[in-house]
Image (spheres, rainbow, N blue to C red):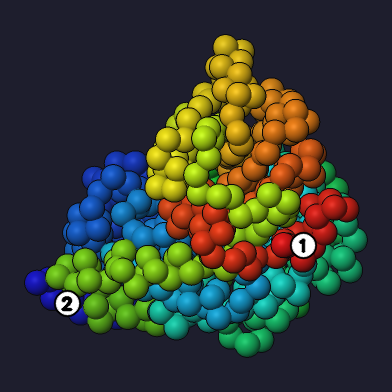
Amino acid sequence: MNTPRSRPHPQVDDLSLEEKIGQLVMARYPDHDVIADALRQGQAGSFYFGMRGKSAEDVATILNGLQEEARFPAIVAFGFACTDCGSGLVAGNCMRLGAARSPELAYRLAYLETSEQRAYGFHIPGTPVLDVNVNPVNPIINTRAFSDNAELVTELGMAMLRGVLDARGVTCTMHFPGHGATDCDSHIRVPVDARPFDELWETDLLPYREAIPKGLINGVCTNHCHYPCIMPGPPQPATVARPIVTDLLRGRLGYDGVIMSDSLTMKPMLDAYGVEESAVLAVTAGHDIILQDYRTEPRITHAALLEAARNGRIPIDQIDASVRRVLALKEWLGLFEAPLVDLAQVSDRVATREHADFALKVARESVTVLEDHILPLPPQSEHTVLIANGRDVAHDIDLDIKHLPATGKLVQALQRREPAIEIHVLSKALEHSELAVAEQAARSADRVIIGLFTRVLCYHEDSIGLPPAYVALVERLVESGKPVVLLNFGNPYVMANLPVPGASICTYDEHCPESFEAATEILYGEVSSRGRLPVRVSERYPYGHGK
């Protein structure tokens, strides 16, 4: 058994300038040895390191090893992106919680997810997203948000914040001051939110205005969007805007916790300012921790900040204040008393039966039926055909995640009910020949089930939409008069431009196996649907719609 060993608890005055600067850097780099060296040299006070494909025990062992290398105990970020060995509790798509409308579910999900990540050795679960998705064509928020309703986002967001804090995690409320009204991906270019400040205040800032006075936030993540109502002039990311990071968040809203930047590898920062200047500008704006460029070694960012401190660009008083906040957060996390996790307990706390059962409960409460003219389906027919897009691997460049096709989970769930179902899973290319074969099979079937797979994918703004050729196929099959079911595993807004089928179901999610199981249960009448749309999709499908 690995016994957590205590470490000295330094005060700000105990640290050299080099060590203070290190506490401001969250190291991210694909090489384990580079991360270890940055921690050992005191050039980073937190880190983010991908370990997908590793077992839970291996992940915990690696993180313990890195903590042992660190000069000071480190905050470890974003277990949802770094691993793939947990349960279906990842809350990356908050919209399903918006559909469930249950603060109790939101709290419990956040608590269990954070508890799992703490068992590995992570401290920042990366949740919740507090953006209010008021723009239906927003390509980078979309299902990551709870809703387009600020009050619902606030209610569920505060429940999740309580869950994260009660499990002793760091909240990562994103993307301050709000990314939900934008129409482009901030990984690619600077989105401009041209709304007046009053609208921003009443909508996007409502969750922060409610949560901050209640002490529910200990970590905020900013964004790379531009807000002319706060910063007039040429587009400038909020990341470098002191009127947003310091004057608005610290001053007007009274927030006194840790402020983190979004990734400085994202093009609005890297293309405009370069690696070193991005880091300096983010710190001078008021960030306590910056997520450094993952294409360069952490020492480069550390050296740039150190030089800026020595030449007076970054005031020493500001550095000291940031370091105090970071050290206080580490103390609250218990990192000085127990920086290591108990390896013997990892398997007992991660991906348990209790957690899987709860993930299924969340899915059942959130799945939303939009049309039910032919529901429930009889479990057997002479000839059922499934057609689904999404056969190919999708690569999230920013998170360095290769998303394996989720269609297999749908196939398995359906085959448990209809072993003889005919399967046509289409490639991303949507070749004419495969479309023709699938359509011919569908026209000879008794009924057709069509899977709609979309996802939010960094650097791919079209990933939330359906390919035109696939939409045309759906239109032809629905208009043929065949009994057609649409199963939507992703962006609900695509339903606005599709014909009305015999039945349609939204899950808002393709990450969790439980979403496929719950949708199939509802399809065949094994359980009743409870979810309600948390966004307005169209006149036919308003906010709150659900059968």
Which percent across, then down, holds residue 468? 72, 26
Amino acid on which disc 2 is placed: Arg
57 left or right of 185? left
Q: How many marks?
A: 2
Amino acid on which disc 1 is placed: His
Q: Quadrant of residue 353?
A: bottom left
Rendered-image quadrant of the N terminus:
bottom left
Q: SS for tag 2?
A: loop
Is disc 2 in contact with disc 1, using a CB cutoff of under 8 Å? no
Q: Nearer the viewer, residue 343 or 438?
A: 438
Q: Quadrant of residue 333?
A: bottom left
Which percent across, then down, holds residue 498? 77, 38
- Does 496 sit above or below residue 351? above
Quick one: which residue is furthest to the front in this view? 382
Which of the two discs, 2 and 1, sits closer to the camera? 1
Q: Which residue is label 2 attached to? A: 5
Which percent across, then down, holds residue 142? 67, 51
Q: Which residue is label 1 attached to? A: 545
Residue 16 in sight from this viewpoint: no
- Residue depicted at x 60% and y 79%: 103
Quick one: which residue is furthest to the left in this view? 1
Residue count near mark 2 (Cα–Cα under 10 Å), binned few <14, some 14–19, many ≥20: few
- Residue depicted at x 73% and y 42%: 501
Which percent across, then down, holds residue 359? 44, 65
The earlier-in-sequence mark between 2 and 1 is 2
- Residue depicted at x 29% and y 41%: 31
Q: SS for tag 1?
A: loop
Rendered-image quadrant of the C terminus:
bottom right
Residue 61 in sight from this viewpoint: yes
- Residue depicted at x 68% and y 49%: 374
